[in-house]
Amino acid sequence: MGTDRRNSNRTPLEDYALLSDMRTGALLSREGSIDWLCCPRFDSPSVFSALLGDADDGRWLLTARNGKVVDRSYRDRSFIVETIWETGSGKVRITDLLPSQLDTQVMERDERTRVIRRAECIDGTVTIEHDLRIVFDYGRTTPWTRKVGAERTGESGLLSIAGPDALFLTGPHLDPDSDAQRRRDREQTNGTRTTGQSRPDDTQGAISSALVGEFEMSEGDRLEWMLTWHRSHLDAPEPIDTEKAVEDTLDDWQEWASHVKVRNRQEALVLRSLLVLRALTNGATGGIVAAPTTSLPEDFGGQRNWDYRFTWLRDASLTIGTLVDHDFTDGALHWRNWLLRAVAGDPDDVQIMYGIDGERNLDEQELPHLSGYENSRPVRVGNGAYSQYQSDVVGEVMLSLASLRDAGVEEDEFSWGLQKNLLSFVERNFDRKGHGIWEMRGSAQYFTHGRAMMYAAFDQGVRAVEEHGLKGPVGRWRSLRDRLYEEIMEHGFDEELDSFTQTYSNDEVDASLLQLPTTGLVAADDPRMLGTVKKIEEDLLDEQNMVRRYRTEAGLDGLPGNEYSFLMCSFWLVEQYAKSGRAEEGEKLMDSLCGYATDLGLFAEEYDSESGRLAGNYPQAFSHLGFIRALDALEDNLPESGA
């Protein structure tokens, strides 16, 4: 539809805040524009896509004319954003949120997604500028918009419909005859976006789908808008008590946070990271998305752009372990139950990732009409890596479920039975090559990290029998575990390099090797591990001492271009330092890495040391998990920490 404008979003990722209702997430820029929102789920088609294009691909801007942002923060321990704008004549506080559904049964029954935006003049006078541009289906379908009277909904508003989607806007009336609206309509008529609009031939009563307006405010005035997504065949929704919705949302986040144990060091950033993990979780199913976004580039202007709005077994497993470490086993059970449902069935059908509800088909496609963030194309939805075999994932699942057992959570027949099936899956795929933890799209290999995680899987099976009294073929598991140990030491460790290697067939190193101590294969201070760390420092550190995943120039991943350093890998190096007698160096690196969190405590996937910008999908669960684990390791190993 339309022409390729290629005027893509240049708002830095660090300027975005995350809003979440534990079903979907929105990205709100510092300048007051919601540039990304998918309804009703994280993985649904977006209704605002300016993040991957420009304003005409959909956004919702609410700003103070001629103003500047002087403060922005999350309200207490929540995902309610409060932004203070200052103009030459006054100040205004703008509050943004996706109100949460406190009741899981209500969440399952009511698919509606709501966005509340509130402006309160706290000093002098200000002019609020409003610009809402709705384009459904990743910016492909412009809706038909009309006024809906109060007799239908209990509150008058503007209803935008296209195909299965509808958005209902209530709040201060937007005048279709205003000067601001006429200016916007002229822009649209002059060719900014005229094709692809979904409207009936009879457009009587229809108005522009770009809803703009200006509102004068004085001290004490309050304006409030609510945008509600619902299925188009249903009536526009009844109004809700927004004041109660705001307070209930705040109470919900704070109640959850009160159960989590947080240590003193970087307490606020740790708590925010734990809250991010919850914010990226579907409250009904327990599926946690790796990130709420797709196609944010690993290399600005490059092709390494992937959809992360799905649930990886690896991420879910690490989340379980992290919550257990912070004494929140009840919360960890929510993620565990999703994981067990996802892998239930034929053990030969285990995937590395699933949809939020456990869906298995995540076919990948490209969206050529979107110019991409920083002109990084293609924009992709779906993720073809779901069909890959990665030999590490069962080991990570077994390690996380072992942490629950060790914390006193008893196994039931369903849970332990599935774990035995997973070990059978590993056994049947014992000699199979994989694509590695990084989902490389080159040829399959024996990745050392993956083989070590297979070792960990069998080792945890043995421990479950020997230490917890569970039933299983412990002799066979022990034999397979020991066989893997000998194999890895023979083929995955290079005596001449004094280092473990990325694969059995090359002499490269890979940041995933930093995780070998978590498998139980070697200790963090084992000489072979120390030699590996030295090689990683030589080959994978950038100028800011951040860690790349691997040398892309080696060509193993089958992809063009390069990528920036990964925050998760850098946190792994901190963890390794802490556990191998280099805790002070780890603390120094950690202090540097904490500086790459945004003002709201959010971490992206990567950091471009040259430009000083965050990159990759955002915010990234993997990065927040790595941060928490690294900080815990420092707390346990710094003598002065008092832990």
Image (tube, rainbow, N blue to C red):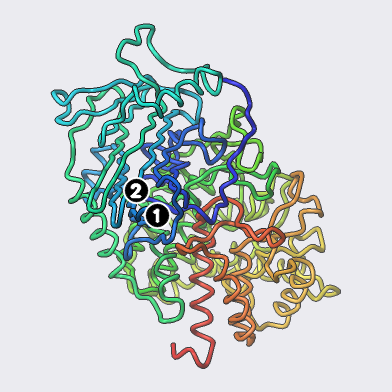
- Residue 543, placed above or below residue 351: below
The quarter of the picture where the N terminus appears is top right
Which residue corresponds to mark 1?
85
| Residue kind at label 1, given as amino acid type | Trp
Q: For the point 51% across and 45% down, which residue is it?
A: 293
User: Can see residue 431?
Assistant: yes
Q: For the point 67% across and 58% down, which residue is it?
A: 608
Q: Quadrant of residue 580?
A: bottom right
The quarter of the picture where the C terminus appears is bottom left
x, y (%) of residue 469? Answer: 38, 73
User: Can see residue 340?
Assistant: no
- Residue 47, placed above or below residue 87: above
- Residue 237, placed above or below residue 143: below
Which residue corresponds to mark 2?
126
Left or right: 44 in relation to 492: left
Q: Residues within 10 Å of mark 1 (few under 14, many from 20)?
A: many
Q: Are marks 2 and 1 in contact (CB under 8 Å)?
A: yes
Q: Nearest the camera: 448 or 95?
A: 95
Q: Nearest the camera: 266 or 522?
A: 266
x, y (%) of residue 574? Answer: 60, 75
